[in-house]
Image: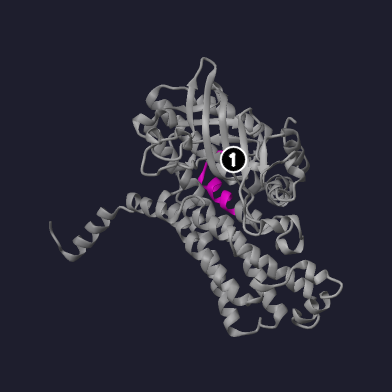
Amino acid sequence: MDKIVSKEDYIQSLKDQKHVVYYNGELVPDVTEHPAFKPHINCAAKTYEMAQRPEFEDLATATSHLTGEKINRFTHIHQSVEDLIKKVQLLRAIAHETGSCFQRCVGWDALNATYMTTYEIDEKHGTDYHQRFVEYLKYIQASNKMLVGGMTDTKGDRALPPHQQPDPDVFTRVVERREDGIVIRGNKAHQTGAVNSHEVLIMPTQFMREEDQDFALVCAVPLNAPGVMQIFGRQTNDQRHLSSEMDIGNPQYGLVGGETLLIFEDVFVPWERVFMNGETDFTGLLVERFATLHRQNYGGCKGGVSDVVVGACAVAAEMQGSAGASHVKEKLAEMMHLTETLYSGSVSCSAMGQKTASGAYYPDPLLANCTKHNVTRHIYEIARLAHDVSGGILATMPFESDLRHPEIGKYVEKYLSGVEGVSTENRMRILRLIENMTGGTALVESMHGAGSPQTQKVMYARLAKLDMKKKLAKDLAGVSD
């Protein structure tokens, strides 16, 4: 397939890919037919579908600065503050239609971080990584393939640097350098969307010392390359995909993002797909840039998802007759306030973005970290309020099969009814949606996706200019050194 344009093209490309994926100990012959993967595929497909809809053309497409061609925005390198803001607006718009994670952000952020950083590596070291990457980027833009950004390694003993690990494969590394390329071995963990992506852009997971040169690696690998394997991770309530449509809560778009453990067993990578090879002095910068670009996103996508949660809670309150209660109105108002606070953080770090040496634009890192840190708190508060509004039935509701049962179904129908004229099934469906969006995997991803809260606090110490703030206070107070 030359170029993926439509949802149908995307699904066919995954059928043709025939990559190695295991689910619950079994090899999956066709990921597009597996019930556990279909919702994740539908979410990612939305990024292709919306780019074809006229009302989203301005957000979902862009003009390539390399070729002048119209491209899907998820393959675009940000060329202005306006591009950064459109990114956030697009994420909120897609979240409105999926209520879940659509997975292409990670690869998009990896493209932008690599574009910026290879330019500066070449400036310092006289390498040709940036031109290699530009050619690769042209290929991705022309084919519209979906990338997963491979940053997180399992890390083994975290008290030890990569080169001192008893088993060095806990970090992805170069095990052989050949005339025509390199051979890599290792892993990437928590790989959102990898099961339904086409390629992985591997990046270092942390700052590397000079002794860690084999681990200072950036390269692009097709997910069907020999030696690449994926093991799909468990998710909260994942067995519902295999047994019930209604009990899933969000049957078309499912849980969060579908994460895998991605394994590389002596995978060959040609030199034209290698964009860092031992330049440890740039590993920290690349990690910081990727993290900032990814943390920029969270007020957009989580703001959009929270809009759906607010709407679902309002519907649930109407169905059970509590919508007029002042405390319910107050809780919904607080949920809306928290949602807009998240979104405003993503907009602000985008609006304060700056041009890098490569020409690509980069969001304000301090505000991006603040945005993600707010997500780790506000999403939990939104979920708590949603549980409060919905009531205890959210956690103890019978199965869909109980509702359909020829003998006991009438009791479920009778005793779970709400306001007259509202079907019990519809009430159960909206409550299942709230349960799906405010529990388990969804909350954990909000906490740890794009870095756990401690990583944002580390960045505050680096970026918040505490010495300058101390000087401001001393000057105003008349304190001299």
Q: Position of residue 185 (x, y in %)?
A: 52, 30
In this figure, which residue is indicated by the disc labeled 1?
148
**Residue nearest the observer in this picture, 240 or 222:** 240
Q: Is residue 51 above or below residue 454?
A: above
Nearer to us in this view, 384 or 84: 384
| Quadrant of the rendered image containing residue 95 | bottom right
Query: Is 358 placed left or right of 479 in the picture?
Result: right
Choose top left, top right, bottom left or bottom right for residue 160. top left
Q: Is residue 359 visible?
A: no
Question: Where does the image place residue 397, in percent across and percent down from the top left?
Answer: 70, 72
Main SS of the magenta part reads helix
In this rendering, the answer to whether 286 lies above or below 424 is above
Q: Report whether 135 appears left or right of 9.
A: left
Residue 326 lies in the magenta stretch:
no
For the point 56% across and 24% down, the residue is: 269
Residue kind at label 1, given as amino acid type = Val
Q: How many marks?
A: 1
Q: Quadrant of residue 417?
A: bottom right
Q: Nearer the viewer, residue 401 or 201?
A: 401
**What's drawn in magenta, residue-wise?**
73-89
**Farthest-out residue, left:** 481
Q: Position of residue 102 (x, y in %)?
A: 64, 50
The residue shown at (71%, 69%) is 430
Can you see residue 479?
A: yes
Element class at badge 1? strand
**Residue placed farthest to the top in the image?**
179
Q: Residue most toward the bottom?
A: 325
Residue 466 position, x and y percent, is: 28, 55
Q: Is residue 77 magenta?
A: yes
State the quadrant of the C terminus: bottom left
